[in-house]
Image (tube, rainbow, N blue to C red):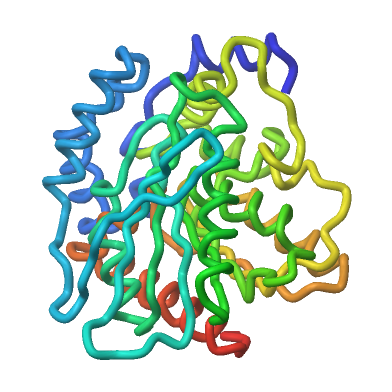
C-alpha cells in the first residue's frame, strides 16, 4: 500500500457502525463485542504501549475460562536467540501425547504473554490430547522484527529436538503470521512441521483485496489497527515484505505442510487466508480455508458465550487433532 494511502487509513478511518453489520452479527456476537469494548475500548489503540498492555491484560483475565480438568502446565526457560526464552508447556496428566502443538499467541506483535491465551492453549491440549508448547516471544516496540520471528523459530527447533512426535504449528492473528512464517522457514527442516492451523492470521496480504475494503472498519479490528501495529513492530519506515514478515510475499509455496486456515467473515484479514490457501494449492500442496460466517476477529475469546464461536473452535480442535495424527480433516 502506498504511504499516502496508509496515512489516510491511519488518520481518517471511521469506527464501525452497528447498522452496517445488523444482518451479519447475531445477538451473542454483538454482546461479545460489547463486552470486549468495555474492557478494551477501540480508542485504546494509540495509547502508550504500556497502558495498552495493562488494559489488554485486564481484559484477558476477565475472559479467562480456566483450564480443563486434567491439564497440567508448567513454565521453563530455553536458550533463545537473545538469551533465556520462557515457554509454557501443557500436557494431559497420566497420558502419552501423540503429537505436539506449538502455539503462538496473538496481540499485534505488541500485546500478550503466556497468560493472555493460557485457557485457549489448555483447551487445545484437552481437546486433542496433544502436548502444547507456547513461547513468551519478545514484543515490539522494545524488540523490533525479527525478534518475535526468531523466538518462534527457536521454539519450534527446541520442540523438534526434544521429541520425535509430529509437530502442528498453530497461532491466531499475529500468532498466525508467526506460525506461517515458521512453516515457510522450516518446511525443509529435518523435522518439518506435520501441519499448520492458522486462525484469522495476518499474512501481509494486498490491502486492496476484498475483505480489506469491505471490512476496513469492522468491529474488533480495523485496517487502521492493522497498520498501526505493523508500524510498531517494525519502527517508523522499517516495514519490508518478505516471508519472515508477510508469508504471502514469498514466491515459493512448495513444500509447505498441510494447512488449515480459519478466518472470520467480518474481519479485514479474511482475504489473507483465502489467498494463502490458493497459493499453497497452486504449488501442489494441500490447504483449505474456512471463512466462519457471522464471526469477527478474536472470536476465540467468545467461544464460551457464542454458539457460532464455539462451533468454530470445535472445528479448529478437530483440524489440529487430525493433522497431528497424519490425517486430512476435510
Position of residue 67 relative to residue 173, above or below, is below
Q: Quadrant of the C terminus?
A: bottom right
Q: Residue at x 44, y 82 (%)?
A: 318
On the image, which quarter does residue 6 sit in?
top right
Query: Residue 65 versus residue 104: which sits nearer the camera?
Result: 104
Number of marks: 0
Q: Position of residue 307 (x, y in %)?
A: 26, 70
Front residue of 188/252: it is: 188
Does residue 164 appear to the left or right of 204 in the view shown?
Answer: left
Image coords of residue 315 (percent x, y): 43, 77
Task: Tell me if 221 is positioned left or right of 305 in this view.
Answer: right
Position of 193 compared to 297: left or right?
right
Give the position of the N terminus as an image quadrant: top right
List x then y, in percent, for residue 87: 37, 53
Residue at 22% from the left image edge and 83% from the top image edge:
93
Is residue 196 in sight in this rendering?
yes
Query: Residue 299 lies in what quarter of the image?
Result: bottom left
How far across and how far down the image is residue 170, in percent?
50, 62
In the displayed structure, would residue 107 be above or below residue 72?
above
Does residue 23 show up?
Answer: no
For image coordinates 57% across by 55% down, the residue present is: 179
Residue in the image at 20% along x and 72% along y: 72
Above or below, 15 against 278 in this view is: above
**Snapshot quadrant of residue 303:** bottom left
Q: Image check: 58 left or right of 178?
A: left
Amino acid at each position: 500500500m502506498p504511504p499516502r494511502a496508509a496515512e489516510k487509513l491511519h488518520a481518517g478511518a471511521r469506527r464501525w457502525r452497528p447498522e452496517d453489520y445488523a444482518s451479519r452479527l447475531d445477538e451473542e456476537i454483538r454482546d461479545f463485542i460489547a463486552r470486549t469494548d468495555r474492557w478494551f475500548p477501540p480508542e485504546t489503540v494509540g495509547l502508550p504501549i504500556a497502558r495498552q498492555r495493562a488494559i489488554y491484560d485486564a481484559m484477558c483475565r476477565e475472559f479467562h475460562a480456566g483450564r480443563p480438568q486434567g491439564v497440567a502446565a508448567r513454565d521453563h526457560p530455553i536458550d533463545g536467540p537473545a538469551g533465556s526464552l520462557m515457554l509454557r508447556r501443557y500436557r494431559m496428566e497420566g497420558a502419552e501425547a501423540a503429537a505436539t502443538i506449538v502455539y503462538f499467541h496473538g496481540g499485534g506483535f505488541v500485546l500478550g504473554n503466556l497468560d493472555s491465551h493460557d485457557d485457549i492453549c489448555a483447551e487445545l491440549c484437552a481437546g486433542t490430547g496433544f502436548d502444547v508448547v507456547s513461547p513468551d516471544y519478545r514484543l515490539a516496540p522494545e524488540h523490533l522484527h525479527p525478534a518475535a520471528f526468531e523466538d518462534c523459530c527457536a521454539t519450534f527447533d527446541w520442540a523438534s529436538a526434544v521429541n520425535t512426535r509430529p509437530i502442528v504449528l498453530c497461532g491466531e492473528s499475529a500468532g498466525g503470521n508467526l506460525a506461517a512464517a515458521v512453516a515457510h522457514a522450516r518446511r525443509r527442516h529435518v523435522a518439518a512441521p506435520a501441519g499448520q492451523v492458522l486462525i484469522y492470521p495476518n499474512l501481509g496480504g494486498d490491502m486492496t483485496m476484498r475483505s480489506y475494503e469491505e471490512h476496513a472498519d469492522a468491529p474488533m479490528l480495523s485496517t487502521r489497527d492493522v497498520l498501526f501495529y505493523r508500524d510498531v513492530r517494525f519502527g517508523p519506515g522499517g516495514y519490508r515484505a518478505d516471508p519472515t514478515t508477510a508469508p504471502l510475499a514469498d514466491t515459493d509455496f512448495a513444500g509447505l505442510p498441510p494447512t488449515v486456515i480459519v478466518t472470520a467473515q467480518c474481519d479485514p484479514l479474511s482475504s489473507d487466508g483465502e489467498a494463502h490457501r490458493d497459493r499453497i494449492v497452486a504449488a501442489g500442496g494441500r490447504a483449505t480455508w474456512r471463512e466462519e460466517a457471522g464471526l469477527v476477529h478474536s472470536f476465540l475469546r467468545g467461544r464460551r458465550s457464542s454458539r457460532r464461536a464455539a462451533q468454530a473452535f470445535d472445528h479448529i480442535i478437530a483440524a489440529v487433532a487430525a493433522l497431528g495424527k497424519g490425517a486430512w480433516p476435510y
